[in-house]
Image: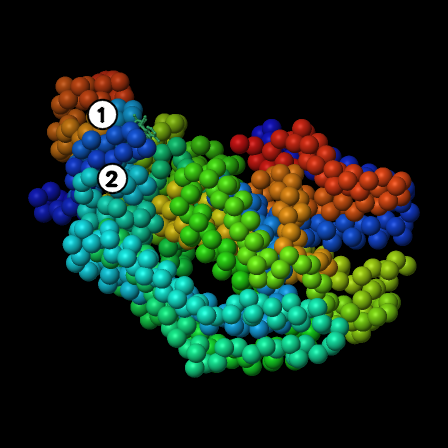
Amino acid sequence: MKAKNKKPLIIIAAVIVTAGVLALLYITAGQQTFIRTALSGLTLGSLFFLVAGGLTLIFGLMDVLNFAHGSMFMLGAYIGWQLYTNPTFIFGLLPQVLAFASGVLITPIIKPYLIRWKVPEYWIKILPKIGYLLSLLLFFVSFIGLDILGLADTAMVAATTATAGDALAEISVQEPLAQYWFRPILIFISGALVAFSTSKPGQKSEFAPKEKMIRKLIIPIALFILAVEATFIRETAPVTILLMNGNWRFIIAIIVSIIFGFAFGAVIEITLIRPLYVRPTFIIIMTLGLSYVIRELVQLLWDPLAYQMVRPPLFAQRGKAASLLEWLQNGNATIDIVGVTIPTYRLFVIALGIIMFIFITILMTKSRLGMIIRAGVQDPQMVEALGINVKAVFTVVFGLGVAMAALGGIGAGPFLPIQPIMGDHYQTQGLITVVIGGMGSYGGAFVGAMILGMARAFGDYFALKYSLSTAIAEASTVIIMIIVLLARPQGLFGKKE
Amino acid sequence: MSDPTKQIDLLVVDNIQTFVGQFHILEGVTVTVPKGSITVMLGRNGAGKTTTIKSILGLTPPQEGRVVFNGMEIQGKRAFNIANLGIGYVPEHRAIFRSLSVLENLKLAERKKGDFDRHSEFVFGLFPDLKRLYKLPGNHLSGGQQQMLAVARALVPDNKLLLIDEPSEGLAPILIQQMMEAIKALSETTTVLLVEQNFIMASQLAERYTIIDDGKSVKSGLMEDLVHDSELIHHYLGASIKTREELEKAHES
Ligand SMILES: Nc1ncnc2c1ncn2[C@@H]1O[C@H](COP(=O)(O)OP(=O)(O)OP(=O)(O)O)[C@@H](O)[C@H]1O
Ligand SMILES: [Mg+2]
């Protein structure tokens, strides 16, 4: 009963404090500066939310703090940037990725037969190991002689010569089909061997019904067809994409980043995190290590340089739009909002954050997956006992969280320099956001992110005005965190344990 | 239900051994549950009744022994697979989902689309209160209502077997009565394995019993034989049951 009465009080108090702080800032900064600074605060807040939203969902359900989240944000930016600037690299590797996935995903088809296979006791343990080893071998063999670094270089070159205007000039040749064809085949077999091993041949206690075989066939076959298709369009597809209108290209880049983020997150959860749920501290160390591995890989592929992604045409025209309509028609880089000049791309980033918040809210409150997540936060065992595959739900949620971070990355692409360390700052701010908002609360993450964004923006403004160090702005977020923690140890929207 | 010799066993727990962490909790539990009746597991606090139920469900998988459900060995399979074979679970301590509304708690239990719609009449017939409350979040329900919801949840999908762990725990006498009626009613269509400390309730509901003591099943048989065997009752169930007078009174009524 007490808790019920306390909640409105806290909300009222929070609203009053927020309104008071905003009014104070408005008075001290003046209208123009206030609007400009507030909008840049909301932009930062949006990006913080895209990182923190995934962090908090994952933490809420699985008690996992993903310290590689910032690296995944950065990876999302790189993948999107690649597609947008020169997708040679992506299309060069796509056939192998698709073929491998198609191989792995035959698991539900072969498993019902493999587990019924009569294998001597001794071989039940050995067979999967042999499968994994062979798979690993074929995996590496399928890449031998493939100039991955060369593929990666093309976008680098394209990026540095973008001003020359002719991106197509930088399309580099792919390996000829006559030399390439065996790679997707080998890696498909490698994937199929993973499927063989994870099926645990001969293990009678495993469960796999033979029902709905047709439905299980759809995904691997579709992926296989796509892999074949992708093998033939390695060279033409990048050209097609580069000839597209930049806005469409940007939309495709966003979609590709999201899909990549989801798949990457799901794979990381299954392979690296799942074995460690029983040892939570190991997960922290593992994800921390993973973040360095990702960063080193990116540096290897694209050098430790900072790239500037060209803004899509909708945000690139010179000149200031007087209204939203004019901007949408002309694609101006800036827009006039009550006399203040605002870069239009910022509005896009803010919209991205708000749309994602609405999407998560609907997902959590209206969908069955959301229901399962909310129930799983409290009692995963009971959810499992209802007949729901909780492990699979963990994988999906981890994938969703990483997809959100990747979306944040590509969203930040035209706005931040793209470089290996670009995620680090967002990792820290994301964690602080989660702590302020309350671990596991996506609403809290949204509010927390906006508070932090504002604090950063106004901190920077005042630091500049009174010629203080900008470190004050950075420290302000930590100070806010400490104040919140002292007042409400569970965070603004967190539940008491 | 008429002739026990004709019944087939829906569930056979055959001499299972279960470890929880490093603790050897079950050291040989055997329970058979004939189709179409209520079987009760009795035993002192900490005897291993809950662990037996969780072992059947695969939540604490047994290391040794067999669990046969509907003719299929299920030990070692994952819990959600076991549940999907048609086993419903009502956990002890009313483990409903507190942040979900009553309706969401019920909807979550669906295994096929439309499960809830097909069974809602039956469920709300047994627990009319829930219909009135269906928009409230779980944590706004009283203890009794939460227990009703926990049972109702297990009735949403088509289940062949229900595992019900101490449904009367902490309920007021009038609610115990209602719970008993509900379990009696649902047992007409579903087989039930019940854990119940309230001996009066257990003896009125169950056809068969198994006594678990210190991680082992020590005795099983027909309930009507047990109620007359006061020595056995006191030896194994001692502290956990009501006085004989109460027992007698219950049987007179
Ligand atoms: N996670 C655990 N770790 C250690 N011991 C446990 C754990 N779970 C249960 N036990 C022990 O196992 C034994 C059996 O527990 P269980 O809950 O199955 O008993 P029960 O018969 O259901 O008792 P109750 O009537 O109190 O519900 C108890 O002694 C308990 O202390
Ligand atoms: Mg118990």
Identify residue type, mark 2: Pro
Q: Is residue B151 visible?
A: yes
- Which residue corresponds to the image point at 70% horizontal and 65% vertical from the top-left? A309
Question: For residue B25, which quarter of the picture?
Answer: top left
Could you tell me residue B169's position as x and y percent?
Answer: 36, 29
Front residue (pair B73, B112): B73
- Residue occupied by mark 2: B62
Question: For residue A464, which quarter of the picture?
Answer: top right
Could you tell me residue A69's position as x and y percent?
Answer: 57, 49
Q: Nearer the viewer, mark 1 or mark 2?
A: 2
Identify whether A48 is placed above or below A107: above
CA gap, disc 1 to disc 2? Answer: 16 Å
Quick check: marks 1 and 2 in contact, CB under 8 Å?
no
Could you tell me residue A81's position as x and y percent?
Answer: 64, 65
- Which residue corresponds to the image point at 56% horizontal and 70% vertical from the top-left? A151
Instruction: Tell me, for residue B214, which label it has, or none.
Output: 1
Chain of the residue displaying label 2: B
Identify residue type, mark 1: Asp
Could you tell me residue A187's position as x and y percent?
Answer: 39, 68
Chain of the residue displaying label 1: B
Front residue (pair B90, A59): A59
- Please tell me which of labels 1 and 2 falls first in the chain: 2
Q: How is the image coloured?
A: rainbow
For the residue labelled by badge 1, is the local secondary structure a helix, a strand or a loop?
loop
For the residue labelled by badge 2, is the local secondary structure a helix, a strand or a loop?
loop
Instruction: Tell me, for residue A339, which label it has, or none.
Output: none
Question: For residue A478, which quarter of the picture?
Answer: top right
Classed neighbour count for the residue bearing mark 1: other residues with Cα under 10 Å, few (<14), some (14–19), many (≥20): some
Q: Is residue A327 visible?
A: no
Identify whether A8 is placed above or below A426: above
- Which residue corresponds to the image point at 53% horizontal and 32% vertical from the top-left? A497
Q: Quadrant of the N terminus of chain A?
A: top right
